[in-house]
Image: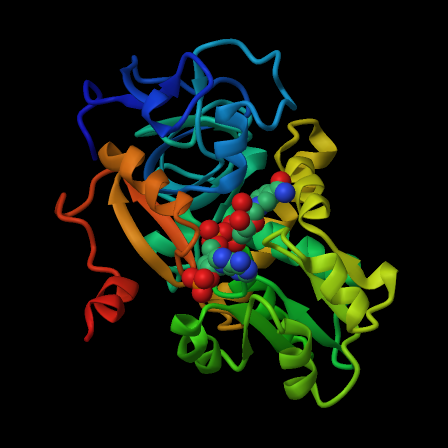
Amino acid sequence: MRAPTDVYSYRYTRYGDADVLHRHQVPLPRPGHGEVLVDVVTSGINHMEVFLRNGKEDTWHDDPWPRGSGSDFAGIVREIGDGVVGFSVGDDVIGHVRTGAHATHLVVPATHLVRKHRSIEWEVAGGLFLAAATALDTLDDLKIGADDTVVISAAAGGVGSIEAQVARHRGARVIGTCGERNFDYLRQLGIIPVRYGDGIVERIERVSRRPVTAYIDNFGKDGREVAEALGVPAERYRSSEDRRDVELALLRDDPDSVAHATRMLQQAADLAAGGAFRLLVSGLYSIEDVVEAYEDLHRLHSRGKIVLATNPVTRVRMLRARELFEAMP
Ligand SMILES: NC(=O)c1ccc[n+]([C@@H]2O[C@H](COP(=O)([O-])OP(=O)(O)OC[C@H]3O[C@@H](n4cnc5c(N)ncnc54)[C@H](OP(=O)(O)O)[C@@H]3O)[C@@H](O)[C@H]2O)c1
């Protein structure tokens, strides 16, 4: 385990781009009643924390400064406060927190944690929470099942790739929008790829073979018009704004919201461990390269998730499948 002197978190003192994030050396936090101290191993990055950091999203604008960053994490229980049942020192856990996950150590109520299955890699575990819980909430809300033909936009991205695979797992026929570079990736997952951009309605109609019954727009560009043109009933269309609401609800820290978020995280972990979906981590960065990691996310072409590691084996960034692909003549 890391020496207790080497304890830090990434925080920001004003709204802005990722370079407002700075490393703050902090004392080792101690767990209080019902709380657990976790040695963070991996932590995901999400667009929502970008919107909170740059001020585009003003929910929680009263939060004190400096502010923490990040809501997904996985790690090892280092210490437990009194009154905690169900977790012991040394347990591998996956967790969620409204903000502050981009840190080496985290104190959270035990209600924010689930056990990490041994079969889930640390990289995947750290990036699981917000993307998978958003995907599951959206599929449940639309009651996606075996009778559906569903179109999912940005299907190669963090949320979309989980939505698409779990919809398949539920028996739906799934059409995913992406760039051509992701066609093979989606095909490998049993998803029918369709290129986004002009002519998308005709391209979807060409491959759908039956009426499209639901449309999930992750990207937030022209989804409503496309869904209407395809004849998707209005009540079976979910916009990027709907997704915003789902994500904010998952981040709320009142007890009912936390309990729901933890249930969704548990379901996500069970589904991942059971092979219902594979979360591809296409960028694994040292937490010290958090600014570069967000710049990568900002390019809007990551496949699956981008994840930070607090103690990577090497500072050299993991070679990403998409870079290999793009380097090919
Ligand atoms: N409204 C909100 O509050 C809200 C909340 C969260 C996220 N979002 C937005 O949702 C989007 C996806 O989120 P995510 O977390 O899944 O992101 P992500 O992992 O960053 O998604 C990246 C994916 O988007 C695809 N993409 C790029 N341009 C596209 C286009 N014009 N149409 C369809 N797909 C396109 C890329 O595919 P290719 O590489 O194949 O092009 C890539 O696989 C982001 O743009 C994000 O800003 C909105």
Q: Is residue 72 left or right of residue 263?
A: left
- Residue sitting nearer the eye, 275 or 117: 275
- The relative height of residue 186 versus residue 285 in the rendered view (above or below) is below
Asked whether residue 269 is in view, the answer is no
In the image, residue 319 lies at what x, y percent?
Answer: 20, 59
Asked which quadrant contains residue 188, the reply is bottom left
Asked which quadrant contains residue 194, the reply is bottom right
In the image, residue 118 lies at what x, y percent?
Answer: 37, 60
Q: Is residue 249 left or right of residue 45?
A: right
> Residue at 66% across / 41% down in the picture?
244
Q: How many marks?
A: 0
> Residue at 22% across / 67% down in the picture?
324
> Residue at 47% across / 66% down in the picture?
273
- The relative height of residue 28 versus residue 46 in the rendered view (above or below) is above
Asked which quadrant contains residue 251, the reply is top right
Q: Quadrant of the N terminus?
A: top left
Residue furthest out toward the front? 198
> Residue at 63% across / 20% down in the picture?
60
- Residue sitting nearer the eye, 89 or 166: 166
In the image, residue 240 lies at what x, y percent?
Answer: 66, 49
Instruction: Tell me which colouring the rendered structure shows.
Output: rainbow
Residue furthest out toward the bottom? 209
- Residue sitting nearer the eye, 125 or 32: 125
Q: Quadrant of the C terminus?
A: bottom left
In the image, residue 152 lies at what x, y percent?
Answer: 63, 66
Asked whether residue 324 is in view, the answer is yes
